[in-house]
């Protein structure tokens, strides 16, 4: 629901020109203070009006013409800047194209008279009813600036200490302001300029009005705090009460009550469901989203709860000829979002009601002139069952009843007023120019300080870099020496490792357990053992003693390998693969065959394992290789025959089809 001013919250001032002219020297104003119940009336001067507003801090200063309080736009912005933080200036007759005050008062049932005091009273009552537009020249963003309260000047060592103290004080005050903003849960952006010893200034862009910010402007010792609201590019108007357009409402009552709101174009605005809210809360939720023209249900007859809501809005009712089927409701709401079946039913009722009235809405829209609100006309036609012509005639009669016009443009100034205005403008320009010069001097002083700080910092940085360069050069020479020593040691280690490998090989062959090794040692060949046919086992053997081309490889378990594992072994290109247990998979066998790698049973080779290696008879290995080649030739021959048979079959099939 829209908030309304009452005797319990705030006072509203209604203001109207009593005598004189706002561009003259001494206009007087009729002022009415309204608290929702009682009224106080007075006639005051412009100066006393400002003091009265500053002292009482009313929630609203209401007028039918904002230019009755200022001669032009610049004066109006200045007047807005002098208002207390919680006080709004409201033009009750509208925005850029206001209506006459008499028409607005008649529309809202407020007493009106042409006497200035009566007009001020009407303005106060209308503003208390949230009628009108707030006049705004400032945003809700406020700039809080913490800066030096005095110049740092020039000097020697003691002056540096003085500058450091000032910058430290600014930094300390900036941190206090930041803590206060955090405690108030205000969003802000901080921009600081760091200087020798602390900050030269800190600027906070705060999302909030000055009244919301727990920081006071002023100067204290070495620090000053400035608070300024961000000004808009021009004058803007914001309605006191949020506009509520006409809508169509669908309801599904029950243990869980669901409500859906659809605009007059068939677009879904909102939907919700609740188990706890009563009818009053549901009505309040609807009011916040619009003014219902039609209230609909998905069943017939209309449930009593839905009927009660319809009557409270004096809206038209809609129910289907028979209860809407579930399939139909799902189809109508297929493109909409909802959380449960109750919300779906409420959405379906609202959308079906829109479908039923769509043609009527279009016919009425074609007849309504642009200057009239289509929603107001539809409400009277649909809910009030009036004809479009009767409604338009009634609205036209209302417009003709009030011939009063409100002039919002300033009148032509006299020669003396123009001269005074020119002189005032010149004074303002000179004062502004003087302020600009002062700011320029301050900026230049700050820039000089920055250059001096940068020069000192650059000199310190240069000395530090020189020391670093000398140290880097020394470390680079030391590193090069160590790298040479490391390279020499690595080469020596590699030579020793090669020598050790050769010694191990000789030792293993010399200590073989073959009974006839002494007689036929020239017939022995080393065998490299792989525990199982897996990629990890192959990698482990390669890491342990290295796998090289033309090696004799012994697989303890040849089963389980796939194509990729076989390709890993084939990449080594061993001389022969001896397998003890397990059968090779078809994929692994194909890969080894494709790479022309002989595979044979380890049982056909006399072999003796010695530690991580093994030795076998060269003659047995050659026999296994020769047997494999014989089998390979036979296998290749069979494959060729199968390929020829397949080609002949395919050729015959092609001829049969042709």
Image (spheres, grey):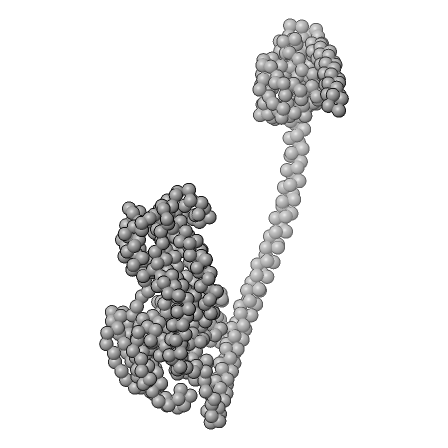
Residue 521 in the image: state x and y as whole percent: 70, 10
Left or right: residue 319 compared with residue 361: left
Q: Give above or below for 294 relative to 232.
A: above
498 or 186, which is in the foreground? 186
Q: In this view, does 490 lie to the left or right of 45?
A: right
Residue drawn at the location 37% of the way across and 79% of the way down: 401
Farthest residue, direction left: 38
Residue 73: image location, x then y, percent: 46, 80
* Viewer-proximal residue among 622 and 609: 622
Q: Which of 605 and 79 is in front in this view?
A: 79
Q: Is 495 rendered above or below residue 239?
A: above
- Position of 544 with respect to 70 (left or right) is right
Q: Is residue 488 above or below residue 60?
A: above
In the rendered view of the protein, which quadrant contains the C terminus?
Answer: top right
Asked whether residue 346 is in view, the answer is: no
Instruction: Name the residue: 38% across, 61% down.
Output: 382
Number of disc labels? 0
**Residue 264 seen anywhere in this rendered image of the structure:** yes
- The percent position of residue 286, horizontal first and vertical second, equals 34, 58
Figure quadrant of residue 509: top right
Where residue 561 appears, x then y in whole percent?
60, 21
């Amino acid at each position: 629901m829209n908030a309304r001013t009452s005797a319990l919250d705030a006072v509203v001032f209604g203001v109207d020109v009593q005598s004189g002219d706002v561009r003259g020297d001494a206009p007087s104003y009729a002022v009415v203070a309204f608290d929702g119940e009682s009224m106080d009336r007075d006639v005051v001067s412009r100066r006393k009006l400002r003091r009265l507003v500053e002292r009482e801090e009313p929630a609203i200063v209401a007028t039918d013409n904002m230019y009755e309080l200022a001669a032009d736009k610049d004066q109006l912005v200045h007047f807005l800047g002098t208002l207390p933080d919680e006080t709004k200036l409201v033009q009750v007759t509208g925005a850029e194209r206001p209506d006459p005050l008499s028409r607005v008062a008649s529309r809202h049932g407020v007493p009106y008279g042409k006497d200035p005091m009566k007009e001020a009273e009407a303005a106060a009552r209308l503003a208390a009813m949230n009628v009108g537009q707030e006049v705004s020249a400032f945003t809700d963003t406020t700039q809080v600036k913490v800066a030096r309260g005095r110049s740092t000047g020039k000097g020697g060592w003691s002056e540096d200490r003085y500058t450091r103290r000032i910058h430290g004080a600014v930094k300390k005050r900036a941190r206090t302001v930041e803590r206060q903003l955090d405690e108030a849960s205000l969003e802000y952006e901080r921009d600081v300029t760091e200087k020798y010893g602390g900050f030269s200034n800190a600027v906070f862009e705060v999302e909030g009005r000055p009244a919301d910010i727990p920081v006071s402007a002023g100067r204290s010792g070495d620090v000053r705090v400035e608070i300024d609201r961000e000004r808009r590019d021009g004058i803007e108007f914001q309605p006191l009460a949020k506009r509520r357009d006409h809508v169509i409402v669908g309801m599904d009552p029950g243990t869980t009550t669901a409500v859906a709101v659809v605009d007059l174009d068939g677009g879904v605005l909102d939907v919700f469901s609740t188990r706890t809210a009563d009818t009053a809360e549901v009505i309040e939720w609807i009011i916040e989203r619009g003014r219902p023209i039609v209230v609909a249900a998905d069943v017939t007859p209309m449930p009593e709860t839905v009927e009660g809501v319809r009557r409270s809005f004096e809206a038209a009712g809609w129910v289907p000829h028979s209860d809407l089927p579930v399939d139909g409701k799902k189809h109508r709401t297929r493109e909409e979002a909802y959380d449960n079946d109750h919300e779906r039913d409420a959405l379906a009722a609202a959308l079906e009601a829109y479908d039923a009235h769509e043609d009527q809405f279009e016919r009425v829209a074609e007849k309504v002139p642009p200057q009239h609100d289509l929603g107001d006309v539809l409400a009277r036609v649909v809910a009030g069952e009036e004809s479009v012509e009767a409604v338009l005639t009634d609205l036209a009669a209302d417009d003709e009843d009030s011939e009063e016009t409100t002039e919002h443009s300033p009148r032509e100034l006299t020669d003396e007023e123009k001269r005074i205005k020119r002189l005032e403008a010149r004074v303002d320009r000179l004062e502004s120019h003087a302020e600009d010069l002062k700011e320029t001097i301050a900026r230049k002083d700050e820039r000089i300080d920055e250059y001096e700080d940068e020069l000192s910092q650059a000199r310190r940085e240069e000395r530090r870099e020189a020391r670093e360069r000398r140290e880097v050069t020394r470390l680079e020479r030391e590193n090069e020496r160590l790298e040479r020593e490391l390279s020499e040691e690595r080469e020596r280690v590699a030579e020793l490792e090669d020598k050790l490998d050769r010694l191990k090989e000789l030792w293993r062959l010399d200590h073989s357990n073959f009974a006839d090794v002494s007689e036929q040692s020239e017939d022995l060949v080393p065998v490299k053992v792989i525990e199982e046919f897996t990629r990890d086992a192959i990698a482990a053997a390669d890491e342990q003693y290295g796998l090289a081309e033309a090696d004799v490889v012994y697989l303890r378990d040849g089963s389980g390998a796939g194509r990729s594992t076989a390709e890993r072994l084939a990449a080594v290109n061993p001389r022969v693969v001896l397998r003890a247990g397990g059968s090779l998979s078809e994929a692994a066998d194909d890969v080894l065959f494709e790479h022309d790698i002989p595979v044979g049973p380890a049982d056909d080779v006399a072999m003796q394992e010695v530690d991580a290696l093994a030795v076998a008879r060269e003659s047995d290995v050659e026999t296994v290789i020769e047997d494999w080649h014989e089998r390979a030739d036979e296998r290749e021959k069979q494959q060729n025959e199968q390929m020829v048979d397949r080609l002949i079959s395919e050729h015959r099939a092609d001829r049969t089809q042709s």
